[in-house]
Amino acid sequence: MKVLKFGGTSVGTADRIKHVAKLITSSGHNLVVLSAMAGTTNTLVEIADYCSKGNIPGAQDTLNNLLLKYQDVIGNLFDDGQSRDTANAVIAERFSYMRALIESDFSSADAREILAQGELMSTALMNIYLNSRGVKSTLLPALDYMRTDSFGEPDMKYIATRLRRLIELNRDADVFITQGYICTNDRGEIDNLKRGGSDYSASIIGAVIGADEIQIWTDIDGMHNNDPRFVNTTSPVSQLNFEEAAELAYFGAKILHPNCVLPAKLANIPVRLLNTLDPDAAGTVIYNMPPDRKIKAVAAKDNVTAIKIKSGRMLVAYGFLHKVFETFEKYQTSIDLMATSEVGVTVTIDDDSHLAALVDDLKHFGTVTVDRDMAIVSVVGDLEWHNCGFAAKAVCALQDVPVRLISYGGSDYNVSMLISSSDKVKALRLLSDALF
Ligand code: ADP
Ligand code: ASP
Ligand code: MG
């Protein structure tokens, strides 16, 4: 069995749903993971935001506009009246549930319930549509098996037991449909795997059922060698190993959720990135491939903050890094890049929610300087240190861009440079010209 995950744009209109239904039907007895229709989760976030600010009319107005969109999709999706009625009834129920949440005393748990409705609706529509075409598809409710533990990590044992049982109970189905992104948490509340988390759902599901392959279907023909939103001359990378894919996803290649690689890697299941709009394109396969002495791709991540701590007392410098790291741990802030010297250390973070307190504490150990609005550009591939000149090529490409920090040698797969966000696009283009 394969896991096929379709993202928001792949199911964003009635025509796209019909097209994906054809892909699903021709692919065999598989498990399909769906995101919410494109734009829905953003709108649900907006609705929850209005509620948290007490602007109930704002939330209602936005909800009503969203309902119009779904009614329009249903109108265009179904030819037969009975399926259309079923779909309208399901969607109406979801919207009255959201309306009740909006009008109640609003809590953060209510917000998460609202965010979950997008995937519940897209999967319901796909399931009804497949049934209306004579396909025996069965919904496997993610809220019945996908659960996170008290650390917010997927509870793999629970997920495996529950999901395998659900599949077994419904073994007559032609195809299974389930929701990406949504889960319950250790308190039994509805929760989610963070924005873009449907990829993560697909990988977790693939791992626990021992899938033959995990396919991530999106709106582009695989992982490109640079960010296609900023560079015109990108091309797809045919193969990556899990580590390279993880580095690219973490450092900004939006096509993959950063957490999605690990479950597939641990279970040694290949992940294939495919294009819904061009299903015959080869895409990218991510698997346990041996090193191939190639630089594969470049990615960039914004909203990075650099913190430099210059040691105050050089003669007792041992223990200095320990105290610095302990401070980051205290504020549950993880460090991305790091450069050290005898007299100081610079680290980067992307979560600056505790920045002021963190800096205050760090001042006990040295002089602290903060640079905001920075970006990390990462060059990813077979950057094992014996591959002489590979890292130099990347660094030289940025000779006209001020570079605040260089990180190389942390893994065999990456050289990362910290620059001003305002130089990001220029840097991505220079790297494309120099490397590909
Ligand atoms: P989905 O809704 O299917 O999950 P996403 O929008 O999350 O799709 O991811 C696909 C998008 O990722 C592409 O449209 C593209 O703009 C963007 N992207 C960013 N970097 C890359 C890259 N290196 N290769 C391919 N796509 C990328
Ligand atoms: N619908 C969710 C989001 O927009 C999850 C996903 O699309 O992967 O973030
Ligand atoms: Mg995505």
Image (cartoon, rainbow, N blue to C red):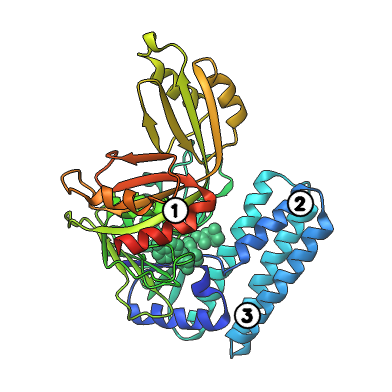
* Amino acid type at mark 3: Val
Asked if residue 257 can be seen in this view, the reply is: no
Q: Position of residue 333 (x, y in %)?
A: 50, 33
Q: Which is closer to the viewer, label 3 or label 1?
A: 1
- Tell me whether the residue at label 3 lies in contact with that at label 1, contact meaning CB atoms closer than 8 angstroms: no
Q: Nearer the viewer, residue 60 or 221?
A: 221
Q: Is residue 428 left or right of residue 330?
A: left
Under 8 Å from ligand 1: the CB of mark 1?
no
Residue reaching furthest top?
Answer: 315
Any mark on residue 51, and which?
A: 2
Identify the residue at image location x=46%, y=22%: 310
- Please determine whether, in this image, residue 192 is positioned above or below residue 366: below
Instruction: Measure the C-alpha gap from mark 2 to mark 3.
Output: 26 Å
Q: Position of residue 413 (x, y in %)?
A: 27, 48
Identify the residue at image location x=36%, y=25%: 341
* Amino acid type at mark 1: Ala
Q: Quadrant of residue 88?
A: bottom right
Any mark on residue 300, and which?
A: 1
Q: Nearer the viewer, residue 97 or 313?
A: 313
Of marks 2 and 3, which one's residue comes earlier in the chain?
A: 2
Tell me the SS state at disc 1: strand
Instruction: Measure the C-alpha gap from mark 3 to mark 1.
Output: 35 Å
Q: Nearer the viewer, residue 365 or 255?
A: 365
The residue wearing badge 3 is 73
Instruction: Measure the C-alpha gap from mark 1 to mark 2.
Output: 34 Å
* Amino acid type at mark 2: Cys
Q: Position of residue 168 (x, y in %)?
A: 35, 62
Which class describes the residues within 10 Å of circle 1: few (<14), some (14-19), or many (20+)? many
Q: Position of residue 183 (x, y in %)?
A: 51, 51
Look at the image and tell me in which quarter the C terminus lies: bottom left
